Image (spheres, grey):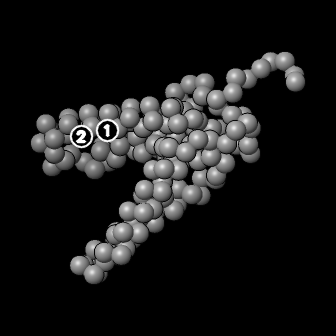
Amino acid sequence: MSSLAQLFFSYRGRINREIYWLSTIGLLAVFAALVSIELADGGIIGKPALILALAYFPLLWGQLAISVKRLHDRGKSAGWLLLFVLLPIFLELIAKQLGGSAIVLLLINLAISGWAFVELGLRPGTRGPNDYGPDPLQPVSDTPA
């Protein structure tokens, strides 16, 4: 990635695991700092929700962007985020409606979240160029092969 703006706001290209983890930890640190400031200031009481949304939206956008690029490095489309993000939210909502009898849904939710963790954070990317760009671990040469 050539710049932080491209890393956090573009959905094109690929990133390796190291960049993914460093970016995720950085975004988490910024999120924790914002939450700490918010809690020290007495929570969201009296603050317009729009101000909070404006503060947290770039963090969410950045995390989605680096997740998409990590999926691209694995040779997968961004559509996998629907499975990894939206399905667990949907299953959680159903589980809350079912109450104590929803253990199977919660276990499925845990399995999907674990799969996402492994897919995004642990598995290596495809070697060489793929449909989403050049291999981020191979240096780009200026001379044709």
Q: Residue at x 28, y 50 (%)?
A: 49
- Picture coordinates of residue 30, whole percent (x, y): 33, 33
Say if residue 11 shows up in the picture. Answer: no
| Left or right: 2 as drawn, with respect to 94 | right
Please give the residue where the numbered disc 2 appears in the rendered image: 35
Query: How many other residues sit within 10 Å of disc 2, few (<14), some (14-19) or many (≥20)?
Result: some
In the displayed structure, 87 sits above or below 45; it is below
Q: Are marks 1 and 2 in contact (CB under 8 Å)?
A: yes
Q: Residue at x 50, y 32 (%)?
A: 18
Marker disc for residue 15 = none
Q: Residue at x 57, y 31 (%)?
A: 6
- Looking at the image, the residue that sits furthest to the top is 143
- Picture coordinates of residue 75, whole percent (x, y): 67, 48
- Picture coordinates of residue 103, whole percent (x, y): 31, 75
- Looking at the image, the residue that sits furthest to the right is 145
Closer to the camera in the image, 126 or 92:
126
Marker disc for residue 31 = 1
Say if residue 7 shows up in the picture. Answer: yes
